[in-house]
Amino acid sequence: MKVIQKQRNSRMCVICGLDNPYGVRAPFYTMQDGSVATAFAFAEHHQSYPGRVHGGMITAMLDEMGLRALWAAELGEKTYGVTTSLETKFRKPVPYGAPLFGKGIITKNTGNFLTAETKILDRDGNVLANAVIKYIKLDVARIGKNISEHEEMCYLVDDGVTELDID
């Protein structure tokens, strides 16, 4: 599927932060169908049991994709929100050190609230984990300081990705 635009990375987020030595450093892309997608790999320091990623890291990735799906649907990082509920289903063990894909899409978007569905897949397209997440939209100033693209969301790195093979 065609990439419409690359989304920004932050400085210290555990999922997308490029300056976080323990983070995933995942890139995110707005896709032609209005979804968000990513190609990434967890590292060994994200493990729970040997060979498996910790459920908290899996859930954090699913949550990150949810709000970024809103940015994809609205074609920009102007709207922010805070998670109000998140239901994760762990379907198969998620390995570290292996190529993975993620996809998220907004399924409901009202004035103040939104719902997203997100999933993590292996390279064969098997769903390893998925989530339904609800958010409340909030002005960025109410969420925290230095979140703007000029402070925390400061990296827009062109990596040349124009397509991702994610269903």
Image (spheres, rainbow, N blue to C red):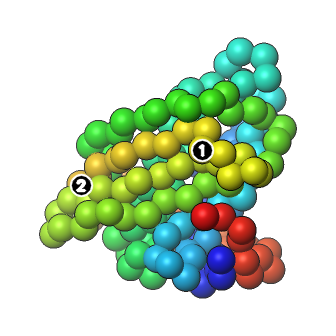
- Helix, strand or loop at disc 2? strand
Residue at position x 44%, y 71% in the image: 71
Question: Seen in the image, is 128 located left or right of residue 50?
Answer: left
Is the residue 52 above or below the residue 84 in the image?
A: above
Locate residue 103, reporting x and y percent: 56, 59
Q: Compare residues 37 and 128 and report the one nearer the observer.
A: 128
Q: Compare residues 24 and 88 and report the one nearer the observer.
A: 88
Locate residue 40, reporting x and y percent: 73, 52
| The C terminus sits in image quarter | bottom right
Residue 136: assigned label: 2
Three-letter code, disc 1: Val
Residue 63: assigned label: none
Mark 2 Cα shell of 10 Å, populated few (<14), some (14-19), many (≥20) = some
Residue at position x 71%, y 71% in the image: 164
Q: Earlier in the sequence, mark 1 or mark 2?
A: 1
Locate residue 73, reporting x and y percent: 41, 75
Three-letter code, disc 2: Ile
Residue at position x 75%, y 32% in the image: 95
Residue 25 appears in the figure: no
Residue identifier under label 1: 127
| The N terminus sits in image quarter | bottom right
Is the residue 9 above or below the residue 132 in the image?
A: below
Is the residue 128 above or below the residue 137 in the image?
A: above
